Amino acid sequence: MDQAQSLRRVAARRRAPAAGGRGLRTIAITSGKGGVGKTNVVVNLALELAAQGRKVLLIDADLGLANVDVLLGLAPRYSINDVIHGDKSLEEVVVEGPRGIQILPAASGVSELTSMSRDEKLMILQELDAFQTDADTVLIDTAAGISDMVLYFNTAAQERVVVATSEPTSLTDAYALIKVLHTQHQERHFKLLVNNVTDARETKEVYRKLAVAADHFLGGLSLDYLGYIPADPLVNKAVMQQKALVEVYPASPAAKAFRELARTILQMPPADASGNIKFFWRRLVNIS
Ligand SMILES: Nc1ncnc2c1ncn2[C@@H]1O[C@H](COP(=O)(O)OP(=O)(O)OP(=O)(O)O)[C@@H](O)[C@H]1O
Ligand SMILES: [Mg+2]
């Protein structure tokens, strides 16, 4: 598709409505270490935020195996890759999940954004801007590790929720991620969610260790404690059923904790109340 075609298609669409005047919240869910529960957190948090009135767009930025569509039993046909190559509009790529949440499969393709020319970025931006969404909350499921892509999504989002377990390796990897985001990308605000907890006393210890290390070695950053999700065998049962835990086992301990987590997040003041989806797309495409 050439630029003129793209411009015509964009012009033919209505502009996206504003995000309800409440300001857009963009939150990356991240961890450093793999397998600590990011994708389960992102999916169940998205559904609980939707139940509490938010319009959620979930960006799946992890190429891993058990990603968002697998957990929800969805089979998206396209990804943001198809938008970048000009073959599809964002409307055609985004799939709808339970409770009306929108899911954008973004794991493949986004790395190309960083190497694009300004003109190419502007074209992508037009496609993103033309997307009609009333989303007021964007959640991003990042991959494990501290790859450029992980850092990229963490810096594009206004808020970062670090998921950790009480395993020492989870703590050291969470610390390493916070360190690189702080020292190389000047991120100063982080939120901690402790997952897979068998003894509630563990969580305070996890928070204390991370907060002490961050304060001692890094300084000048804040780590807010969001709470914890208990270890709950029904989490895995829901995974096997490819259904969201909060939908199939809403009374389970972990589902209750996700409900509480959504409440906690909504009660916290947003990092930047003035943001809207267009600002976010600009940050994502990395263009001013
Ligand atoms: N609170 C919990 N209680 C019991 N099991 C859990 C809990 N949270 C996650 N799990 C289990 O941990 C496993 C990994 O979860 P998940 O896929 O969400 O992790 P992840 O951090 O997204 O992994 P990756 O880094 O590979 O993307 C799943 O099999 C899930 O069943
Ligand atoms: Mg995952």
Image (cartoon, grey):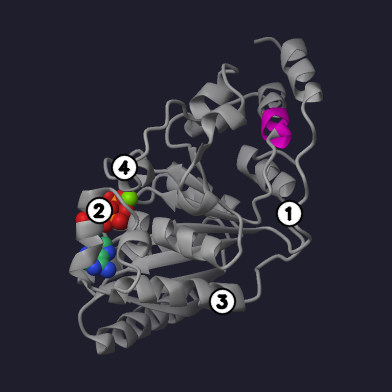
Would the CB of label 3 be found within 8 Å of ligand 1? Answer: no
Q: Please, what secondary structure does the residue beneath circle 2 have? A: helix
In the rendered image, the quadrant that contains the C terminus is top right
Q: Is tag 4's residue or tag 1's residue first in the polypeptide sequence? A: 1
**Residue 257 placement, left or right of 161:** left
Q: Amino acid at mark 3?
A: Gly
* Distance from the alpha carbon under mark 2 to that under mark 4: 9 Å
Task: Between residue 157 and residue 184, name the one nearer to us.
Answer: 157
Q: Amino acid at mark 2?
A: Val
Would the CB of label 2 be found within 8 Å of ligand 1? Answer: yes
The residue that mark 1 highlights is 19
Residue 256 magenta-highlighted: no
**Residue 191 placement, left or right of 26:** left
Q: Please, what secondary structure does the residue beneath circle 4 have? A: helix
- Residue 262 x/y as whole percent: 50, 71
The quadrant holding residue 66 is top left
Task: Between residue 229 and residue 54, name the one nearer to us.
Answer: 54
In the rendered image, the quadrant that contains the N terminus is top right
Q: Please, what secondary structure does the residue beneath circle 3 have? A: loop
> Could you tell me if the residues under marks 4 and 3 are in contact, i.e. CB atoms within 8 Å?
no
The residue that mark 4 highlights is 70
* Distance from the alpha carbon under mark 4 to that under mark 3: 39 Å
* Distance from the alpha carbon under mark 4 to that under mark 1: 28 Å
> Could you tell me if the residues under marks 3 and 2 are in contact, i.e. CB atoms within 8 Å?
no
